[in-house]
Amino acid sequence: MSLKFPESFDPQPTLTDDLLELRPLTLDDRDALADAASDPAVWAGHPNKDRYRSDVFQPYFASLLAMGGCLVIVDRLTRGVIGCSAFYTDTNAPSRLSIGFTFLTCAYWGGTTNRAIKSLMLEHIYAQAAEAWFHIAPDNLRSQAATAKLGAVLMHEDMMDIGSGPQRWKCYCLTREAWTAAQSLPTRGGG
């Protein structure tokens, strides 16, 4: 799945803060990312629950590499690969910049890591656009809650093909203004 992005948007920047480095995914990341994905608990709330298996993950990795917007997430302290996330565009509304395909090893759940990832990626989107979109499987309650903590609002449900065939997705929008307002609120664990 190769995506088209607005001409002035760089879908594979290197983004860093004190905790994390997000950098373009390369073929050399295959083994480290497969290791990060190898825990069944990582995929428990995901539509593709068997993605922890190597034979299922390898084609997924190839699709992440081909999409052109995937970033590998590295813990700056340990230098270990802890997951990935991606910029992509909505197949039903190609001008919408979206964030998804995110997974993290379980050791990084329930802390500040998701907020740090999204902060880096959202600031990159907001340099070009006024809103960011997230598409979440209806039964992925963990991701829905984490997205709502960012300040995103459920706008609608839609049938979309964002890489693994047509599926129903909950579509959340996070405007630049809502994100800025959410930053002034105290952090509630896990977001």
Image: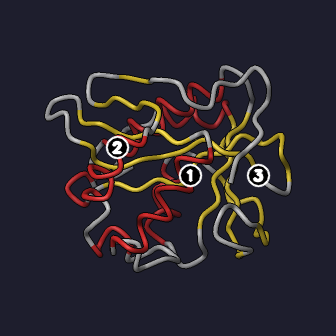
Marks 1 and 3, the one that precedes in the sequence: 3
- Report the mark closest to the observer, 2 or 3: 2
| In front of the other: 137 or 155 | 137
Q: Secondary structure at mark 3?
A: strand
Question: How far, Cα to Cα, is label 1 from label 3?
Answer: 11 Å
Tell me the mark number nearer the camera, choosing from 1 and 2: 2
Disc 2, SS: helix
Q: Quadrant of residue 106?
A: bottom left
Query: Which residue is disc 2 drawn over?
Result: 29
* Residue at x 79% of width, y 30% of height: 6
On screen, residue 189 versus residue 78, left or right, reads right
What is the spatial separation of the Cα atoms under label 2 and label 3, in whole angstroms? Answer: 26 Å
Q: Which residue is mark 3?
A: 90
Amino acid marked by disc 2: Asp
Could you tell me the amino acid type at mark 1? Gly
* Kind of residue at disc 3: Asp
Q: Position of residue 155 (x, y in %)?
A: 75, 59
Question: Are there few (<14), some (14-19), or many (20+) residues within 10 Å of tag 3?
Answer: many
Say which residue label 1 marks.
100
